[in-house]
Amino acid sequence: MRFPLAILGITAMAGSALADTRLASWDVDLTRDGPGLLLRDILRESDDILAVVDAIVAAKADVLLLTSFDYDAGGAALGAFADLLAARGADYPLRIAQATNRGLPSGQDLNGNGRLGEAEDAYGWGRFYGEGAMALLSRLPLTGDLRDHTADQGRLASSGLWVVPLGPLDVIAFAATTPAFGNETRNAAEIAQAAALIEGRFVLIGKPNLDPAAGAGDRAVMASLLADSRLQDPLAGQPTAHWPDPIGALRVDYILPAAEILVAGAGVIPHDNAAFGAHSLVYIDIADVP
């Protein structure tokens, strides 16, 4: 198991301590053309970085999953990004970036074109190791061992699959491959893999990349997950990403808490900033965890 790059303030936490807690997920599209370039742009405080930072500060999330965020083994990019957030009033002491399958060479010709070492030949699509991975920021402390399922089932997870204990909650975080470009079967299998982990007081959060009613993929898989009586869907029917026609608006980002968790509110924060990519930030506000 790889450990998070930062674990601060590990203490026990009662369920009532989660009252008025906001969990959010956002595909921030902070990917670059090569390793180290995201860190460079964060340190330069480039315009797109600052735009994302300002939006996160305004969202006031207590726990935030970032998808499409480049990973580096030393956690330098996430650390610099979190420091930039802290300087603007959004301090996240817990910063998690686990080893990923994105850009991890498989050593095989997975796309069958007779060439090795291409982005499609990695366990998870990536032109370099860590491209478009995921990270988690939290004001809540880690209260147990993080369980990393990224390497399970022949490295099925295209990015990562984590179970992160935060107080009484198990936050199940993942980002599945797109079902387009011949990836329908893998996308469905990744969603099933994450769904198999739900039990107890959980929140399933991230980017399944699948709309239950429109777009590419095995939509019945998503519809079946949303119908599971063990969870609730506070943002039912709301699109979370907007692409040009003919794709249009789709729901591909989700936060699905256990059915017994008391949810005070939920929302999708729209934007018209091209620097943010297609996805909007989604959030839920937890009132209590019985």
Image (cartoon, grey):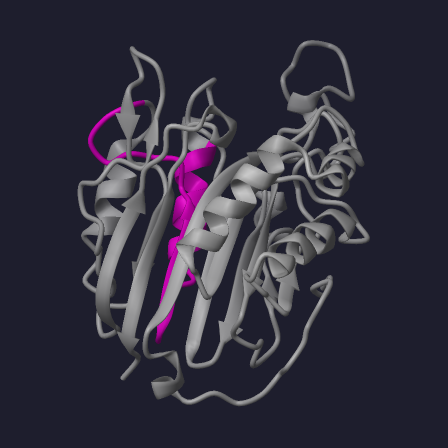
- Residue 199 visible in this rendered orientation of the protein: no
| Quadrant assignment, res 105 | top right
Q: Based on the picture, tell me whether residue 272 belongs to the magenta stretch.
A: no
Determine whether 231 is above or below 112 in the image. below
> Is residue 228 visible to the viewer in this orientation of the structure?
yes
Q: Residue 197, position in %: x, y?
A: 43, 62
Residue beneath the point at 59% across and 67% down = 147
| Image quadrant occupied by the N terminus | bottom right
Q: Residue at x 69, y 28 (%)?
A: 32
Residue 240 pos. (x, y %) = 32, 37
Q: How many marks?
A: 0
Q: Is residue 246 left or right of residue 91?
A: left
Asked which quadrant contains residue 250, the reply is top left
Q: Residue 131: x and y, percent?
A: 68, 34
Quarter of the image for the C terminus: give it.
Answer: bottom left
Q: Nearer the viewer, residue 199 or 289?
A: 289
Relative to 19, 134 lies left or right: right
In the image, residue 18 sits, relative to residue 179, either above or below, namely below
User: Which residue lies at the image location 71% right of the left edge and 41% below the top edge?
Assistant: 42
Between 257 and 6, the one lying in front of the other is 6
Task: Please report the residue visible at 73 percent of the width from the left and 37 percent of the height from the top.
Answer: 104
Q: Is residue 10 above or below residue 285?
A: below
In the image, taking residue 68 as reference, residue 179 lies left or right, namely left
194 inside magenta stretch: yes
Residue 287: x and y in percent read: 26, 75
Q: Which residues are magenta?
A: 186-215
